[in-house]
Amino acid sequence: MKVLKFGGTSVANAQNILLVENIIKKEASENKIIVVVSALHGVTDQLIKAAESASQKDENYTQIIKNLEEQHLNVVKELIPVLEQSSWLSFVKKHFNDIEDICNGIFVLGEFTNRIKDKITSYGEFLSSRIIAAKLKFEGLDVHWMNSSEQILTNSNFTNAKVNFERTEQNFRKYINENQHQIIIAPGFIAQDEKGNSTTLGRGGSDFTASIIASAIHAEELQIWTDVSGMMTADPRLVSHAKPIAEISYQEAMELSHFGAKVLYPPTIQPVMVKNINLKIKNTFEPEAFGTFISQNLNKVDIENKPIAVGISNMSNIALLTLEGSGMIGIPGISAKLFQCLSHEKINVILITQSSSEHSITIAINEKDILNAENAINSSFEDDLQLKRIEPVKIEKNLSIVALVGENMKSRSGVSAKMFGCLGNNGINIRAIAQGSSEKNISIVISEKDTKKAVNVLHEEFFESEIKQVHLYICGTGNVGMKLIQQIYDQNEYLKDNLLINLRIVGLSNSRKMIFSEKGISQNEYVDHINNSENASAEKFAQEMISRNLRNSVFVDVTASSEVPKVYEKLLKKSINIIACNKIAASSDFEHYKNLKSTARNHSCKFFFETNVGAGLPIIGTINDLIRSGDKITSIQAVLSGTLNFVFNNYDGSQSFSEVVLQAQKEGYTEPDPRLDLAGTDVARKILILARESGYSLEFNQIENESFLPEECLRGSVEDFYQSLIKYENHFKNLLSEAKNNGKILKYVAEFKDGKAKVGLQHIAPESDLYHLYGKDNIVIFKTLRYSEQPLVVKGAGAGAEVTASGVFADIVRSV
């Protein structure tokens, strides 16, 4: 014999009940079955709402009851043949008259006790099971309705009654032996005490009813039919890629259900687990789906081929209570006293952790129990509090528990490190940890706002290792930004196939507008979207990133703005990786630069800015490799401005200096204000960054800048600048002539040696490594302890939107 249980969504309406009927017919064709049903979807909550409204003198309770009556009448009209409807319509009306009478009494007395609550909520399952039994009987099936509340005997702890299993099992075995029908329909959730008062079995009570019956009759199998295809690796409302769990042990199922997996409630498992009865969770709306098979006798496979974990569960609305004090150390009975006082208040302790010094005990409870728990603890330890041996209980709210579950965790090393590592890398702070000696469960307490992020991070780490989802926020949609965005779209399939990385642009901003989409901003629409989106600021953009709290977040700054770097520290403290094309942060005050780098380290995130110097050239990366390998940089000589190199390579007297500069700007080699390049400011920042990355403490004002521009060129607007270039054309021609007369060329050179740096225009002879530079090329010549005689040279294109974007892209990939 099999036991089938159908939940509220499965019997929500007549259409769904017809699906249930088909499942029952199929199962009954092969086995005798007992079918346990819940109330129609939402009915129990509405019955409670009606009674609560009545107790508060709110006459709206009558309308709630009327709506519920109409709901049941409609189901009867749709399921029962027309000629047979009259008696069943009267049946429904009679019981709703009883419900209204009870609520009228509550209204008069203004009192809604747990005993009355059990009485009124018992009607939901009673009515649904009678109507379904009638429907099946009219279909010609051998059906019998069983009032399970008369068979399940409990104590009088109303709303969460404790079952007398011995008497209850005797009742069911006797009843089934006397009623040999092919199908027995029974209401779930409801029971009665020794005096015949209605009681209920608490949260998940209908599942529990089915399990009790299956255990009592030693059923071949228990099936729980619901609206999902079995237990999932995580809550699908939080994790879009959650997967069904094909098979799982009872112990694993118990752990998952205890910490919030709503498909199955913990009490359901115990009765069938004791009798070693197999349990299946199936989907009413997809009956052919395999679902989840729960058993003690799973197929044993090579331990190495089994997954480390089977699932992740989470529980919200958690509070931590901490009892601590020097008076607890070495004193026996403190824990017993704590748990006893909580037990008296019927407060369930969900998680426990204690320091090895015995100085503190921390427990997790439901937030709704905080006040009672605090009062109970402070009252129980009143003497200790007065003598200051123990401090008043400390409370933390707005927390949740996330649990990683799997029997196979005990045989694998490094599971905890993997778990805590991925959480730490995403800035998720763990408030408490608990792990049983069986190692089936590692539970953590975290901030409620981090729940979705944490569950997704863990799910990706343990169940989606094939592809890592990275969320990109890009600030700057100029030449470099647009090239970067296009490169990401063009290359993403390659990254997924070869590096198992999926880059998703979820935020875009320019100086005026910003747009966000957690599902990703589409390639075909991002330009139109950003132009028609909300007003932007660096602060608003950063705050939105933080509030969205997505895992594996990367902020990409491809602006020249002085405002954007102001949000770096805030983002790094939230463990958001930063990729900066913008040079302002790395060339700011040394203390600020150092603080940003240490903040990144302290919060387990990356702060990369390779493109600050040399666009896509591996210059900073080379310095870092040299330093990490124990080398020391003694000097740097470099041409670091693709703009200035382009200008002096193309300025030969055939065109005016202003025309060559304008050409450089049009081709995207200059900053928006070309004076940043020509005045040496940009080059000075670059050599400053290289010196700092080489391990030297240097400030911007310590760099000697030998400017070749007349003072007038540095004043006014960009338009004024170009006019002054025309005015001083002879000055630039003289610079060119002087170099040519000496058989040399002009290069703007940055140098660092003996802890000092300078930038300026120099005459370069043909034998110099700096001589043969063309177009927008950069070159950096390193001398180090290891490269003392033959220097290390990095050379290549050092400007241009395409190569700069590719350098930013490379940093993004490195950061994840």
Image (tube, helix red, strand yellow):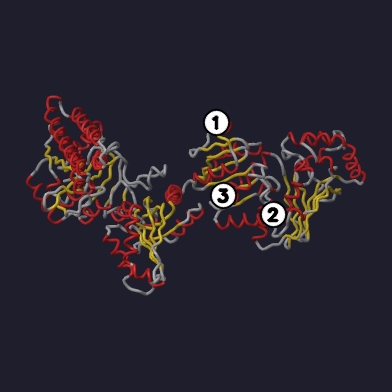
Looking at the image, residue 670 sits to the left or right of residue 114; the answer is right
Where disc 1 sits, the SS reads loop
Residue 726, numbered circle: none
Q: Looking at the picture, how far across and down is residue 72, in whole percent?
A: 20, 33
Residue 464 can be seen, yes or no: no
Q: Earlier in the sequence, mark 1 or mark 2?
A: 1
Q: Nearer the viewer, mark 1 or mark 2?
A: 2
Where disc 2 sits, the SS reads loop
Report the number of discs. Answer: 3
Looking at the image, residue 616 sits to the left or right of residue 202; the answer is right
Mark 1 neighbour density, 10 Å: few (under 14) some (14–19) many (20 or more): few
Q: Residue 433, relative to residue 216: is it above or below?
A: below
- Residue furthest to the right in view is 741
Q: Nearer the viewer, mark 1 or mark 3?
A: 3
Q: Which residue is mark 1?
A: 525
Q: Which residue is mark 2?
A: 589
Closer to the camera in the image, 546 or 665 = 546
Closer to the camera in the image, 214 or 684 = 684
- Whole-angstrom CA distance, mark 2 to mark 3, is 19 Å
Closer to the camera in the image, 509 or 691 = 509
Q: Looking at the picture, how far across and down is residue 550, in whole percent?
A: 49, 46
Taking the spot 54% from the left edge, 55% from the top edge, the residue there is 604
Q: Earlier in the sequence, mark 2 or mark 3?
A: 3
- The amino acid type, in three-letter code, at marker 3 is Leu
Q: Mark 2 and mark 3 in contact? Answer it, CB < 8 Å.
A: no
Q: Which residue is mark 3?
A: 571
Q: Looking at the picture, how far across and down is residue 584, in whole percent?
A: 68, 48
Taking the spot 58% from the left edge, 45% from the top edge, the residue there is 555
- The amino acid type, in three-letter code, at marker 2 is Asp
